[in-house]
Image (cartoon, grey):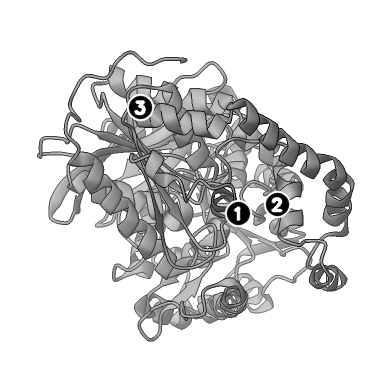
Amino acid sequence: MTDAASGRPIYLNDGASPTFGFFHHAPERSSTGVAVLLCPPFGWDEICSYRSRRDWACDLAGAGFPTLRVDFPGTGDSVGTPRDSGRLAAWTAAVGSAASRLRALASADRVAAIGIGLGGLVVCNALGEDAPIDEIVLWGTPARGRVLVRELRAFASLEESALGAINDKDLGPPPLPNGYVWAGGFVLTAETVRDLERLDVTALALPAGRPQRALMLDRDGLSVDKRLTAHLEATGTSVTVAAGNGYGAMMAQPHQARAPLGVFAHVRTWLQDGPLPDPALGTHARVRAAVELGERAEMVELIEEDVTIRETPLTVSHPRAELFGILTEPCEEAPAPLTAVLLNAGAIRRIGPNRLWVETARRWAARGVRTLRLDLEGIGDAEGSHQRLTALAELYRQELVDQVCAALDTLERRGVGERFVLVGLCSGAYWSFHAALRDERVAAAFMLNPQALFWDESLEASRALRRGVMRTSSWRKLARGQVPLARLRDLAWRAPITLPRRALGRRAARRRGENELEQALDRLRDSDKMLRFVFSGNEPLYEELELEGYMARLARWPNASVEFIPGRVHTLRPLQAQQGAQEALDRALTTVLEQPGLTTEASPASGR
């Protein structure tokens, strides 16, 4: 994996809240003298657009623009939590610090900042505090923070209404203090909301001569903020307004999100049309870069529950793709005899659903458990094609289980672990289950809302029909545009073949005594591997396990247990579901750590 292709992970330790980022250098022969700082949107939009922003950084670097993309403090892989105080100030300071570091790292004489949504507001606020930014690209950025907060509240209201229709009646609204905003599973505190609502870019005193230029992108035809455009022009900034088609596609579900290639090309051209670089400034920057590159930027230490822990980026080599992860471990305590590996939840990167894996990794490291949160092929910052993930079956390929085992190989070679617990949600739960079957070093698998334990192409159709997709209520949804006609047509076409075939196949397997799930559970029981299934309500796999008699026969597998958490949302968006999942995982970890013989040397892995 080359830096130009995928970036070099770094920590910016200049402020009170260390910031995680990826630096993508440009080939020296094509360097333009302009470096780009890429600043993210907030919450669910940040999750969905991650891979597109990675593609954008690679595209810019390939065109001669060294690019640094960052996670704001308390988000992504950066230090802190969204509930910490002073978030807007920390985000603003991070942008200024990142711009300064980028100028040095890239030997650049100009820095252009791209801000999407919240990221654009923070860029403007940083300019008001004299951040060394010369040009800006703002996409979907309002002049006032209260507009952004209003959008988040509207989204939260719609989501709360939708979730209320499918959640347990007693779940209620998110348990938040007054003034907090919850949207898409992410929280803004009352202080952060207040600070954002007070932010008005048109009231900022921008430094003389900066930004020199601004490119304002609309949002799929939704006009740019005219007040912001007028303010920038009044301060002497040369403003260009352009179409930002593809914003919505970039913010689709993580496995469906698509990079807006037309916008990439337009921004490249706009950057190339800027002033020519000043060679003298570039030489000065190279001197500074030599000093700054000498700083240790490949790891960060932080305090979690009064314990000092360390986070270090880690690459895992695999023939199909080089994988990426972040290892969290205690600095002073003797590590526990078990290492945890947190796997992607579908196409969501290593931070996990609603950043659950970051919080879990740091909490467990404080307990002495070294924890790796990992990106598999095509996800997050791992190499490979992201496009294939639109096909659900691609997430259930055995090649991905191979990659999980390769990560265990890497950890063992580095002396980071010999026995492992695997944790996953959705397809990550599937990988956990199958890696436990395949690799004797796996002591336990914790599986949240697994969609399937054995994949079969007929699964979606048979579930949809069993749950009554073809009922009258669904036709009403179709009429309202809530169910795509193509999906119903596809299910109707496949159903006569797949559903009977699936049912007959299972009955035949039972008669022959060859049920693969029973055999797998027996093998895991006989090898004394702990299995913990954690389900939200309304999960189809649990319904099937119950219908097929597995729950009634659970005593046959004393190594396996089932636990339930609040809510009926597969990706754990309700805060009660997030809290329930964390508590369930902590209980499961305690149980496996108390198992006798945990430090016993594992037998050689089989089937790898």
Q: Label 2 sits on what residue type?
A: Arg
Disc 2 from disc 1: Cα separation: 7 Å
Name the residue carrying label 1: 540
Where does the image place residue 575, in percent across and percent down from the top left?
42, 69
Question: Can you see residue 332?
Answer: yes
Query: Farthest residue in the bottom direction?
Result: 178
Question: Can you see residue 280?
Answer: no
Query: Farthest residue in the front direction?
Result: 511
Of residues 150 and 211, the one nearer the viewer is 150
Where does the image place residue 239, in percent across and percent down from the top left?
67, 63
Answer above or below: position of 513 versus 213: above
Q: Label 3 sits on what residue type?
A: Asp
344 left or right of 288?
right
Name the residue carrying label 2: 463
Mark 3 closeness class: few <14, some 14–19, many ≥20 residues within 10 Å = few
Residue ID at (50%, 41%): 428
Of the two numbered discs 3 and 2 in the rendering, the one whose residue sits closer to the viewer: 3
Disc 3 from disc 2: Cα separation: 31 Å
Disc 3 from disc 1: Cα separation: 27 Å
Callouts 2 and 1 close, C-beta under 8 Å: yes
- The answer to which of marks 2 and 1 sits earlier in the sequence is 2
For label 3, the SS is: helix
Name the residue carrying label 3: 526
